[in-house]
Image (cartoon, helix red, strand yellow):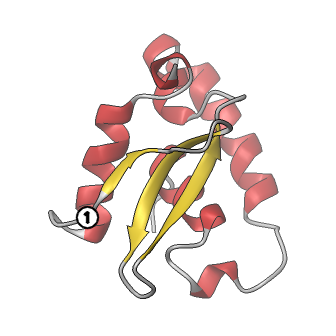
């Protein structure tokens, strides 16, 4: 269940902040992913977030210090990923960084 590993309310609020009130984001139809968001440039859904791991939106409910430690560790790894994901606001890596781990631009 997605609420075991994430907080959909926080993710949906963050998506509206970053992509506007018309953003279409919902639970993923893929069994191993958390969410899917409609990429308005391609009109296709992008699935992101592993259902096997908690994200910042869930950790923060338990302990801020632990949440920030996990966040720092995740971002250290994710921001070093090679490729052109930085230019694509709908890349799964970007979506995870900004929506699930609440990275500030």
Give the number of callouts. 1
Horizontal relation, residue 31 to residue 76: left or right = left
Residue 41: x and y, percent? 41, 88
> Is residue 65 depicted above or below 78 in this figure?
above
Q: Is residue 39 above or below residue 58?
A: below
Residue at figure coordinates x 72%, y 28% from the top left: 52
Question: On screen, 47 above or below 61?
Answer: below
Q: Is 29 placed above or below 5 here?
A: below
The answer to which quarter of the image holds residue 73 is top right
Q: Label 1, on which residue?
A: 23
Residue drawn at (51%, 55%), measured in percent from left and top? Answer: 103
Which of the two residues, 46 or 76, is positioned nearer the viewer here? 46
SS class of the residue under badge 1? loop
Residue 102 seen in render: no
Q: Foreground residue, 96 or 102?
A: 96
Residue 105, given in percent of the width and then of the height, sits at 45, 69
Q: Which residue lies at the image location 49% right of the left edge and 46% below the top edge? A: 35
Tell me what residue is drawn at x 30 percent, y 46 percent.
Answer: 12
What percent of the width, then of the height, locates residue 49? 61, 46
Q: Position of residue 99 (x, y in %)?
A: 46, 52
- Quick one: which residue is furthest to the left in this view? 21
**The furthest residue to the top:** 62
User: Does residue 81 appear in the picture of this structure?
Assistant: yes
Q: Residues within 10 Å of mark 1 (few under 14, many from 20)?
A: some
43 left or right of 101 in image: left
């Amino acid at each position: 269940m997605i609420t075991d590993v994430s907080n959909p309310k926080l993710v949906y609020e963050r998506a509206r902040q970053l992509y506007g009130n018309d953003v279409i984001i919902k639970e993923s139809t893929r069994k191993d992913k958390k969410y899917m968001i409609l990429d308005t440039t391609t009109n296709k859904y992008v699935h992101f977030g592993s259902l096997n791991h908690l994200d910042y939106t869930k950790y923060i409910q338990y302990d801020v210090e632990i949440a920030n430690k996990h966040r720092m560790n995740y971002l250290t790894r994710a921001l070093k990923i090679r490729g052109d994901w930085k230019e694509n606001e709908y890349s799964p890596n970007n979506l995870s960084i900004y929506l699930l781990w609440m990275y500030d631009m």
